[in-house]
């Protein structure tokens, strides 16, 4: 299955999003178990797991919902170009001299 195949790449990214969501679910269950066992005085690992759960859930939803569209280039309006760092600006063909 070549990754250049768009439907295959799309399915792969959507599937990766579902896998990341499963990891977030697992981390959330571990977090709940820690919270129940240590109610009132959570260890530092609980905060790390909460952060991990949030990041995994956010990435999983983005990959599952958007798939390959998540990595598309976007066009920035000319009025915002002064606010874009120079490293991210591309010269338009009519701007080149």
Image (cartoon, rainbow, N blue to C red):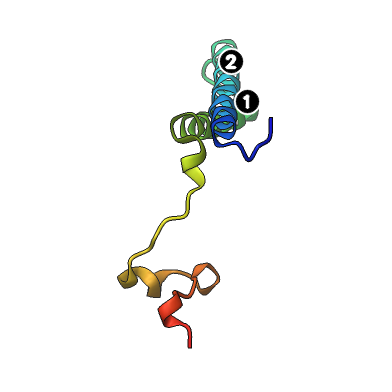
The residue located at (51%, 46%) in the rendering is 71
Looking at the rendered structure, which numbered label has been put on residue 43?
A: 1
- Secondary structure under tag 1 reads loop
Q: Which quarter of the figure has residue 46?
A: top right
Q: Position of residue 50 (x, y in %)?
A: 54, 28
Above-or-below relation of 47 to 4: above
- Secondary structure under tag 2 reads loop
Above-or-below relation of 70 to 49: below
The residue located at (48%, 33%) in the rendering is 58
Of residues 96 and 80, the one drawn nearer to the viewer in this rendering: 96
- In primary-sequence order, the first of circles 2 and 1 is 2
Tell me if label 2 and label 1 are in contact, CB under 8 Å.
yes
Label 2: which residue? 38
The residue located at (69%, 29%) in the rendering is 1
Considering every residue shown, the one lying at the far right of the view is 1
The residue located at (52%, 35%) in the rendering is 59
Looking at the rendered structure, which numbered label has been put on residue 34?
A: none
Local packing at callout 1 (Cα closer than 10 Å; few below 14, some 14-19, many 20+) is few
Considering every residue shown, the one lying at the far left of the view is 79
Q: Which quarter of the figure has residue 36?
A: top right
Considering every residue shown, the one lying at the far bottom of the view is 97
Q: Position of residue 96 (x, y in %)?
A: 47, 83
Of residues 59 and 13, the one drawn nearer to the viewer in this rendering: 13
Q: Is residue 70 left or right of residue 27?
A: left
**Mark 2–mark 1 distance (CA, rounded to whole Å):** 8 Å
């Amino acid at each position: 299955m070549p990754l250049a195949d768009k439907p295959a790449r799309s399915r792969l990214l959507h599937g990766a999003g579902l896998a990341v969501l499963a990891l977030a679910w697992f981390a959330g269950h571990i977090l709940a178990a820690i919270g129940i066992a240590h109610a009132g005085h959570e260890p530092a690992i609980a905060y790390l797991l909460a952060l991990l759960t949030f990041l995994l859930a956010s990435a999983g939803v983005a990959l599952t919902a958007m798939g390959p569209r998540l990595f598309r280039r976007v066009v920035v309006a000319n009025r915002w170009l002064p606010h874009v760092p120079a490293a991210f600006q591309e010269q338009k063909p009519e701007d080149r001299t």
